Image (spheres, rainbow, N blue to C red):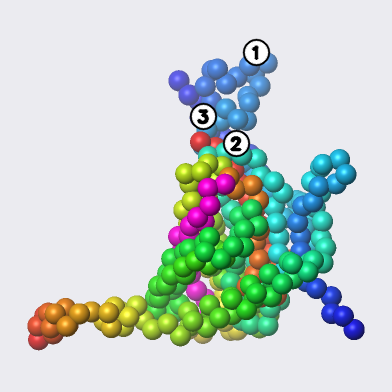
């Protein structure tokens, strides 16, 4: 049995050109985009959660000279 | 001499300034003559948006304001503690048209990140199905110069309950974002959607205000 697609709320023009609020099932193109969006969002969230602390990232990006200077300051 | 005046605009009291030339012989004041006020352009509740829905798109927005201010609160039925609040202008889902930079505060830690060449704008988070009961996310989005080709930078601030139990560390977060839509077309519609699941009844409301110049 075919699963119903998610519903969207949008405005569409009626026969007189007036915008009307409609709630309808996604069409094929919208459904394809939605599945892609959900996948992207999940991957982005995982990447965000796995991202190290900004200070760690900054330390990793420092040059040898900058690290030497940091060591000197901390000594 | 401008006269300060308090007006009820969209259910919110706002202070405006009236000048003599803005008042006609019958003492009627044109709303468009009041500077610095917010006008409620659209509200999911007033419009009668029915839930659950996986996305909400505004009607065509008037192009007569200096900027837009969106106030939102939302919850998703996605199978997670939280979901992203995502936005598109004019339905543009083209990869590469969207970039953003964000800071996220959770517990005592702060993380920063960027997303380049994306296909939508991240505006914060909302509580989802396995998150704490009756909790939501909410935030605000500023879109200055939305009707011009010279605007683009959008700023967002949001907070959300992103855990299952309040009172435990990290159960809520705050995000601040700056985003850019690379297109120059006037923004005529805004689409809001959760990163997964549907917006749910009773916890989701989106209001779009026009800001007079």
Q: Residues within 10 Å of mark 3 (few under 14, many from 20)?
A: some
Residue A10 image-quadrant placement: bottom right
Please report whichever mark, 1 or 2, sits nearer to the chain's N-terminal start.
1
How many numbered discs?
A: 3
Residue for point 31% across, 83% down: A56
* x and y percentages locating residue B198 in the rendered image: 72, 71
Reading the image, the residue beneath label 2 is: B64
Residue for point 64% across, 47% down: B188
How far apart marks 3 and 1 lie (CA) works out to: 18 Å
Does residue B76 show up magenta in the picture?
no
Residue located farthest toward the right when viewing the structure as drawn: A1
Q: Mark 1 against mark 2, which lies toward the viewer?
A: 2
Disc 1 is attached to a residue of which chain? B
Q: Quick one: B56 or A35, which is closer to the camera?
A: A35
Residue for point 58% across, 45% down: B186
In this rendering, do the residues under marks 3 and 2 share a single chain? yes
Disc 2 is attached to a residue of which chain? B
A10 versus B132 height, above or below? above
- SS for callout 2: loop
On residue B25, the disc is 1
Per the rendered image, the range of residues in magenta is: B171-185
Q: Quick one: B144 or A5, which is closer to the camera?
A: A5
- SS for callout 1: loop
Q: Residues within 10 Å of mark 1 (few under 14, many from 20)?
A: few
How far apart marks 3 and 2 lie (CA) works out to: 19 Å
* x and y percentages locating residue B156 in the rendered image: 50, 59
Reading the image, the residue beneath label 3 is: B17
In this rendering, do the residues under marks 1 and 2 share a single chain? yes
Is residue B37 at all visible to an observer of this figure? Answer: no
């Amino acid at each position: 049995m075919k699963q119903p697609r998610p519903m969207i709320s949008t405005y569409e023009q009626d026969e007189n050109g007036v915008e009307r609020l409609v709630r309808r099932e996604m069409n094929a193109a919208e459904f394809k985009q939605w599945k892609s969006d959900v996948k992207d969002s999940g991957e982005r969230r995982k990447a965000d959660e796995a991202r190290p602390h900004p200070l760690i990232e900054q330390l990793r990006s420092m040059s040898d000279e900058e690290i030497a200077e940091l060591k000197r300051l901390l000594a | 001499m401008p006269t300060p005046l308090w007006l009820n605009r969209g259910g919110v009291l706002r202070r405006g300034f009236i000048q003599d030339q803005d008042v006609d012989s019958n003492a009627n004041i044109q709303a468009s003559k009041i500077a610095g006020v917010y006008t409620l352009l659209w509200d999911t509740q007033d419009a009668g948006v029915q839930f659950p829905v996986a996305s909400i798109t505004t009607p065509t927005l008037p192009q007569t304001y200096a900027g837009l201010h969106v106030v939102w609160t939302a919850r998703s039925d996605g199978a997670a503690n939280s979901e992203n609040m995502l936005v598109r202008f004019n339905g543009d889902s083209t990869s590469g048209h969207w970039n953003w930079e964000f800071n996220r505060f959770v517990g005592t830690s702060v993380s920063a990140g960027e997303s380049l060449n994306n296909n939508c704008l991240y505006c914060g988070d909302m509580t989802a199905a396995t998150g704490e009961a009756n909790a939501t996310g909410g935030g605000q989005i500023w879109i200055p110069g939305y009707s011009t080709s010279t605007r683009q930078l959008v700023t967002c601030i949001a907070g959300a309950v992103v855990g299952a139990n309040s009172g435990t560390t990290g159960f809520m977060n705050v995000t601040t974002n700056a985003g850019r839509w690379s297109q120059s077309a006037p923004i005529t519609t805004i689409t809001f959607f959760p990163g997964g699941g549907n917006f749910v009844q009773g916890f989701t409301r989106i209001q779009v205000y026009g800001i007079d110049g």
